[in-house]
Amino acid sequence: MSKRDYYEVLGVGRQASEADLKKAFRKLAMKYHPDRNPGDAEAEKSFKEINEAYEVLRDEQKRAAYDQFGHAAFENGAAGPRPGAGGFDFSGSFSDIFEDLFGDIMGGRGGDRGRRGADLRYNLEITLEEAFAGKQAKIRVPAQASCEKCKGTGAEGDAKPSACPTCHGHGRIRAAQGFFTIERTCPTCGGAGRVIQNPCRACAGSGRVHQEKTLSVNIPAGVDEGTRIRLAGEGEAGVRGAPAGDLYIFLSIRPHPLFKRDGVNLHCRVPLPMTVAALGGAIEVPTLDGQRAKVSIPAGTQAGKQFRLRGKGMPAMRARDHGDLIVQVLVETPVNLTKRQRELLQEFEKAGSSETSPESAGFFARVKEFWDDLRE
């Protein structure tokens, strides 16, 4: 049975760039990897096929030979993929391919870079007023910091780390499993590629010590719930001089007793005396910056009426504008009436008409029509 065209195997055109080849191989390798398809002979066959194709096309000389002569370029002892017990032997080449593609995920080509420090998360609660105005906050973060005594090297005095005898400085070791080779982190050096013969007494050779540091965080005006602030290099220190991780600060905003936030707008519910709602007038409402704003109430204002105060809401983080303050009035029914107040309300009720309560008059008129329809 003839072999499939290598470009067809990877699903790319003959003009595909190196990046296109790598992208196609990564996608297919993930799909047909034996670990994801245990016991699937067809997946194993496809996995071998795409690796064979990629090994040829990723190499400029092999690709040029293949473009000119096709599969014949690698027959009869010509340079190219070597037939093996499984039909294709990539015990050496496949690990290099995987290293090129996923080396950044697995820790890099060599362990001499050390392990980057872990990223940290810090949850910070602020008030709505602080979110409105912004603030400079001080936080204390417990973390692994670089050891000052050994300057993060992990070695005592001027001692230098030496190459790991197990992995010979690579940070990884290879082990054959079936038809391909698996690489894993060296258990002796933990992937660093180096070992400390005379470890620092302060940090026990790790190059890091546990410390609590105080940091200043700039919280810009207008931040919202869940905003994330990144402080580069303020996470845990890396192992033996490797780069530090980052610190991510997640903001939460404490509920406010008067205001509710909706994006850049603020909502405030204000009780309104019945007399003011009926006769009209003016009220003062608070604003989040500590000031007061005047709201004119027209005569006959109903419960639930909303008034919009332009520019009295939250500042927009990416613009100079502010949102609005939306005031919703709640008409308050008087309680604990005196005898005289009760008499006045009774007189008002006797002198009333449908024109003074149009909503209720209209509602009960519709109810009467509904009942009449039921009787018919």
Image: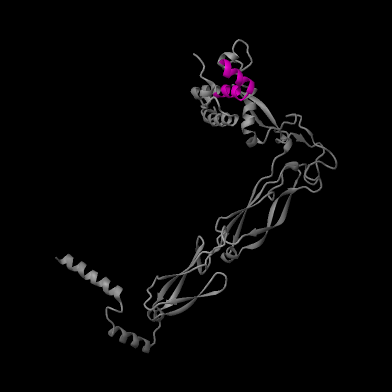
Point out the stretch of residues depicted in magenta: 50-69
Q: Position of residue 71 (x, y in %)?
A: 56, 15
- Height in image: 190 above or below 67? below
**Residue 186 vs residue 80, the one in the foreground:** 80
Which residue lies at the image location 70% right of the left edge and 46% below the top edge? 244
Position of 192 with respect to 90 (left or right) is right
Residue at screen point 62% across, 29% down? 98
Image location (x, y in percent) of residue 281 = 43, 80
Residue 97 in which image quadrant: top right
Depth check, front residue: 61 or 140: 61
- On screen, residue 94 versus residue 170, left or right, reads left
* Magenta stretch secondary structure, dominant: helix
The C terminus appears in which quarter of the rendering? bottom left
Residue 60 place in picture, x, y as percent? 63, 23
What is the x, y in percent for residue 316? 55, 60
Is 30 situated above or below 85?
Answer: below
* Residue reaching furthest to the top: 76
Residue positioned 17% across, 68% down in the render: 372
Farthest right residue in view: 158
Asked if residue 103 lies left or right of residue 352, the reply is: right
Question: Image quarter for residue 111?
Answer: top right
Q: Residue furthest left?
A: 376
Look at the picture and state if 26 lies above or below 218: above
Q: Nearer the viewer, residue 351 or 111?
A: 351
Q: Is residue 219 positioned above or below 164 on the image?
A: below
